[in-house]
Amino acid sequence: MQMTAAAVITNIPKSVSMSSLIPELATLAHAVLATTISLRVIMRRPAVGVALAWMFLVAAVPGLGAVFYLLIGERRVGAKRARRIAAFRTDYERLAQAIIDEGVTNVDWSRHRPEARGLDHLGVKLVGLPTVTGSTGHLLTDGEEILQSIARDIDAAEKSVLMEFYIWNAGGLADEVLQALIRARQRGVSCRVLIDAIGARPWWKGDQPNQLRRAGVDVRPALPAGLWQTIFSRNDLRLHRKIVVIDGKVAWTGSMNLVDPRYFKQEANVGQWVDAMLRIEGCVVVPLAAVMIGDWMLETDETIEQIVNDTGLSLVEPHGEGDAQVVPSGPVETDDGLLQMLLTLVNAARDELVLTTPYFVPDESLLRAIRGAAARGVAVHLILPEKVDSLLTRYASRSYYADLMDVGVKIHLYRKGLLHTKSVTADRCLSMFGTVNLDMRSLWLNYEVSLFVYGEAFGNHLHDLQQSYIDESDPLDMKEWSQRPYRERLLENALRLVSPVL
């Protein structure tokens, strides 16, 4: 005879209450959840240490560990975005065929060290963009001059302006760039502007985006964040690139956001931000434009053909003799392609290696490569700001100093502001310059763009800039550093454990 639900409940022994079942149900739920996530971690095949750490955390901290993993345990970009990113290599090739002269990829590698050609092969294999010849560039280091020069280039635009930045901060000479965009659109220039939704959150809340839209400038937020997006992707995967392309003939890239240093983050008490930007003419403008157009397509429904036709992009003629390779990076996009190129560059150094970065929180492979270079006799110089705007990153970074100085790495602490330039030179003939910090967030989580430039012309110029930073820095003394209080060392090593998410 069948029993109703009510009858079943009434037949539960009085000694067994529903409240007594809750701990058992919670334990069962935790076991199922921990097992499910552990299987997912195993099948995704992260580094062994990372996998074991996540499995331990999920098992040891019921509920919260699982939530933490779902929030930041994977580089989730969303299924739709992942599919579109996967198609970009073909799109880059179509764009290159449309606006680049075929001959400019025929680099004369006899002018360079053998390692340069190896870097080129690695970039093509992992990223899909080859080295192009026929470019020239001018390195600018004064923030006011950079903003004024970008505004002048926009004022000279005849067909199109493509622009993307991580941060736009209103005030000072940054407003001149805004007015230049408005003037350009009023005379019929096609203007597309992509600004990160989180990095520029205060700017998005102001009136300047509406000023641009009222003038007809197409301005969009990159990687919109919110509760709904959290369900399908991580909100902390950010567009950290800085690119400006004007008429397909002139381009800018480097470390500087669209901010006037005199008006930006003055409350952080770290001094003015110190940056460098490269103004480029010639064939390398094309792959930079391709990266920005790819980012634009992810946020809109426009096709390459629509953008090329609207902006009037055409074949780019060689301008100069420089050989450079554009290397974009980001979750799903290139995986560890940039890290592998950076490791190859470090390992290529024979006599001298100089690195500048505001945030130094390397993964184990990069740390070992830098230590290995110093140990084999390469003069390694690491230039860091004395003060940074992130307290957690500051202490995590310090946990690596002793490991580096122990093998002879010379650490220089820049004292005249927050040194924000990201650069590497190996023997003054192999260079990396762009937006990527030497930390795990930049290497694994952010969308970045870097220029690998081959040859002494740019290498010497960039090295001179690095030397000027050294001249305005204080060397870190190993003996003094080893005498810092135990509580500081404990804090540094503890924060090192969470450095992948800083």
Image (cartoon, rainbow, N blue to C red):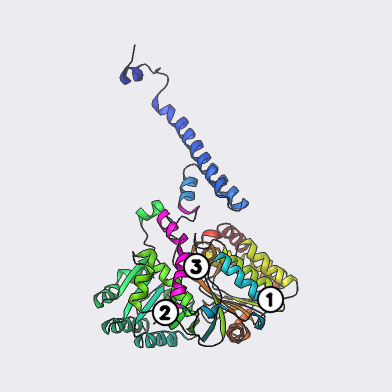
Q: Quadrant of residue 174?
A: bottom left
Indicate the secondary structure of the residue bearing disc 2. Answer: strand
Would residue 78 be counted in the magenta stretch?
Answer: yes
Amino acid type, residue under disc 3 in the picture: Ser
Circle 3: element type: loop
Task: Tell me how far mark 3 sits from mark 1, CA to CA.
Answer: 39 Å
Label 3 vs label 2, nearer the camera: 2
Q: Residue at x 62, y 72 (%)?
A: 119
- Using residue 195 as the reference point, say whether residue 107 is left or right of it: right
Q: Position of residue 222 (x, y in %)?
A: 38, 66
- Looking at marks 3 and 2 on the same chain, the residue that comes earlier in the sequence is marked by 2
Residue assigned mark 1: 114
Q: In the rendering, at what x and y percent does residue 262 appear?
A: 42, 82
Span highlighted in magenta in the image: 71-99
In the image, what residue type sits under mark 1? Pro
Q: Is residue 471 above or below residue 330?
A: below
Q: Identify residue type, mark 2.
A: Val
Nearer to me, 367 or 314:
314
Q: Position of residue 476 (x, y in %)?
A: 65, 75
Which of the two labelled residues, at mark 3 and mark 1, occupies the earlier sequence position?
1
**306 or 326, nearer to the observer:** 306
- Residue furthest top in the image: 1
Q: Nearer the viewer, mark 3 or mark 1?
A: 1
User: Where 374 falls versus 56 (above or below)?
Assistant: below
Say which residue label 2 marks: 245
- Alpha carbon distance from label 3 to label 2: 31 Å
Which residue was labeled with disc 3? 390
